[in-house]
Amino acid sequence: MMRLPVSHPARRPEVLAACAAGVTVVLWASAFVSIRSAGAAYSPGALALGRLLAGALTLGVICLLRREGLPPRPAWRGILISGVLWFGFYMVALNWGEQQVDAGTAALVVNIGPILIALLGARLLGDPMPPRLLAGMAVSFAGAVTVGLSMSGEGGSSVLGVVLCLLAAVAYAGGVVAQKPALGAASPLQVTTYGCLVGAVACLPFAGRLVEEAAHAPVTATLNMVYLGVFPTALAFTTWAYALARTTASRMGATTYAVPALVVLMSWLALGEVPGPLTLVGGVLCLAGVAVSRSRSRSRTATTARAATAPVPRRETAREP
């Protein structure tokens, strides 16, 4: 008897979540190049506020078109915490940190974030820590260290810059862990929109600097700031929230280890910075670690396949008298 091909509709959400995570990683990697360009004309706080305003405006229009209402009350705690920590403090600290240290040191320090996410997720959210996730994180962190060391040979880092990038990593991890429960009560678009709005409100003290600097900034710097708001913020944070709602915070954090490798490639193409052999090796390790952390064991895959192909037992229905 010929067996018909079996479809696996249960894997469709996983594929969509993986694609959403991929969009996020690519756009977040491009943000490093845009921050370098816009940071020459805008101070850290003004750049963060301009980026958040552009993102909030874009997300607000999408919410109106989709007729998304206010998030339910249980989601607001996570939205407020992630908005202040991740959308607000993280962006200011990262912008400031990248003005103090070279890109390699910044990438190395900020990529402590996924480890903090895994630890906080296991402690506060009860996320599992399977061996493949731990192994993938170890490989990716080794790659991030390699990229950082290969790009920071000039010794141009400062203690202030390292501390700022470390604080950005802590805020990033805290924001992700706070956002996860909110996604159980509100949609990814709602969580992202109002988190971005909270971050913009938190950065309003920089409004005067933004107006003053925008009047003298070159058009390219302002366009880069708008790009940061529309794509790496509005779009990428929404795809991140979509993927985070369908997996654990630990696995999503491990996925972002691919960012340093993509930053190296984009800097090579956009800025003409040719990476050395050690940098390329680190990039490959980052990507390999992500692949390991997101892979499934053979036994689990086989169990899922058997469950999908198993015949559904027929229910016995009571006969009418």
Image: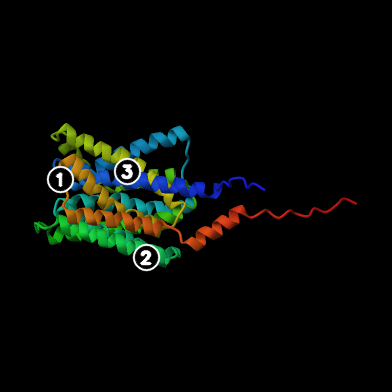
In this rendering, which labeled residue sits more in front, label 2 or label 3?
A: 2
Indicate the secondary structure of the residue bearing disc 3. Answer: helix
Q: Residues within 10 Å of mark 3 (few under 14, many from 20)?
A: many
Q: Position of residue 212 (x, y in %)?
A: 16, 37
Residue, disc 3: 233
Task: Give the number of the mark in front: 3 or 1.
Answer: 1
Q: The disc labelled 3 sits on which kind of residue?
A: Thr
**Image position of 235 with respect to 99: above or below:** above
134 lies left or right of 150: right
State the residue position of label 1: 273
For the residue pair 172 and 257, the one nearer the viewer reads as 257
Local secondary structure at mark 1? loop
Q: Amino acid at mark 2?
A: Leu
In the rendered image, the residue lying farthest to the front is 1
Q: How many marks?
A: 3
The CA distance from mark 2 to mark 3 is 28 Å
Horizontal and vertical percent for residue 273? 15, 45
Q: Which mark is residue 78?
A: none
* Disc 2: which residue: 134
State the image coordinates of residue 307 (x, y, percent, origin top left).
59, 56
Q: Quadrant of residue 289?
A: bottom left
State which tag comes first along the sequence, 2 or 3.
2
Q: Earlier in the sequence, mark 3 or mark 1?
A: 3
Q: Amino acid at mark 1?
A: Glu
Query: What is the C-alpha distance between the residues marked 3 and 1?
Result: 25 Å
Q: Quick one: SS at disc 2?
A: helix
Bin the neighbour count of mark 1 within 10 Å (Cα to Cα): few under 14, some 14-19, many 20 and up: few
